[in-house]
C-alpha cells in the first residue's frame, strides 16, 4: 500500500507549505512509503484529489486545500486530522497501516492479543470445570461420585 500525499509545490501560502513539510517530514521519519502528488502543476492530480475527498470533509467553499492524505484510493484525512493522529500516537492507524514490529503501537496490539488469548483460555478452563461438575451430578441432583467419607465406611 502506498500513501499518497497531495500537495502544492508552488503554493504562495506559508501556512500550507509548513503543513506539507510537517506531513512529509513525519512520514520520512517513520520510513513510511509514500508518494507526493503535485496539484499545482498537474491538473489530473488536482481533479482526482478534489473528487475523492469526502463531501463532509470539504471546506464550505467545496475546495479542499493541500495537504490531503490517501492510502491508495482510501481517504485518510487532511493536515488537521493527521496532526491529531500524530498527537495521539495513532499515525499508523490514521494511515490504515499496521505498525512496524517493535513499535509502541505494535507492542500494544500484541498485548491486547495476549490478553484476549488469556481470557479465551480461562473461559475454556471454566467451561470444562462446569461440564465436569455437571457430569458428576445425576438427574435427581445427587453426586454420582462417592465422597471420601463414603469410601471409608
Image: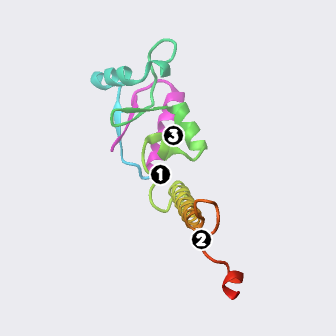
Q: Could you say whether the residue bearing mark 3 is in a helix, strand or loop?
A: helix
Q: Image quadrant of residue 74? A: top left
What is the distance, in whole Å, between disc 1 and disc 2 at their CAs? 68 Å
Q: Nearer the viewer, mark 1 or mark 2?
A: 2
Residue 17 lies in magenta, yes or no? yes
Quarter in which the N terminus is drawn: top left
Q: Nearer the viewer, residue 6 or 69?
A: 69
Residue 94 is situated, as x and y percent measured from the top left of the image, at: 49, 40
| Residue projecting furthest to the bottom | 152
Can you tell which mark lies on residue 29? Answer: 1
- Residue at horizontal 36 percent and vertical 48 percent from the top: 33
Query: At x 45% / y 46%, what residue is drawn?
Result: 27
Above or below residue 114? Residue 89 is above
Mark 3 crowdedness (10 Å alpha carbons): few <14, some 14-19, many ≥20: some
Compare marks 2 and 3 and give the one earlier in the sequence.
3
11 relative to 149, above or below: above
C-alpha separation, residue under disc 1 versus residue under disc 3: 10 Å
Residue 39 placement, left or right of 104: left
Look at 48% across and 44% down and name the residue there: 93
Front residue of 119/104: it is 119
Q: Position of residue 89 (x, y in %)?
A: 57, 47
Mark 1–mark 3 CB contact (< 8 Å): no
Q: Which residue is mark 2?
A: 144
Q: Which residues are magenta?
A: 1-28
Say which element carries label 2.
loop
Residue 117 pos. (x, y %): 52, 61
Q: Is residue 122 above or below residue 69?
A: below
Amino acid at each position: 500500500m502506498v500513501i499518497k500525499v497531495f500537495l502544492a509545490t508552488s503554493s504562495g501560502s506559508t501556512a500550507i507549505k509548513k503543513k506539507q513539510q510537517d506531513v512529509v517530514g513525519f512520514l520520512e521519519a517513520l520510513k513510511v512509503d509514500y508518494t507526493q502528488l503535485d496539484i499545482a502543476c498537474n491538473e489530473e492530480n488536482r481533479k482526482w484529489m478534489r473528487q475523492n475527498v469526502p463531501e463532509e470533509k470539504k471546506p464550505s467553499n467545496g475546495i479542499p486545500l493541500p495537504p490531503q492524505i490517501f492510502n491508495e484510493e482510501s481517504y485518510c484525512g487532511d493536515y488537521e486530522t493527521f496532526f491529531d493522529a500524530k498527537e495521539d500516537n495513532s499515525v499508523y492507524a490514521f494511515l490504515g497501516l499496521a505498525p512496524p514490529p517493535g513499535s509502541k503501537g505494535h507492542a500494544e496490539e500484541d498485548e491486547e492479543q495476549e490478553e484476549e488469548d488469556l481470557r479465551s483460555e480461562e473461559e475454556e478452563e471454566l467451561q470444562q470445570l462446569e461440564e465436569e461438575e455437571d457430569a458428576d451430578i445425576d438427574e435427581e441432583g445427587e453426586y454420582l461420585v462417592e465422597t471420601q467419607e463414603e469410601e471409608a465406611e
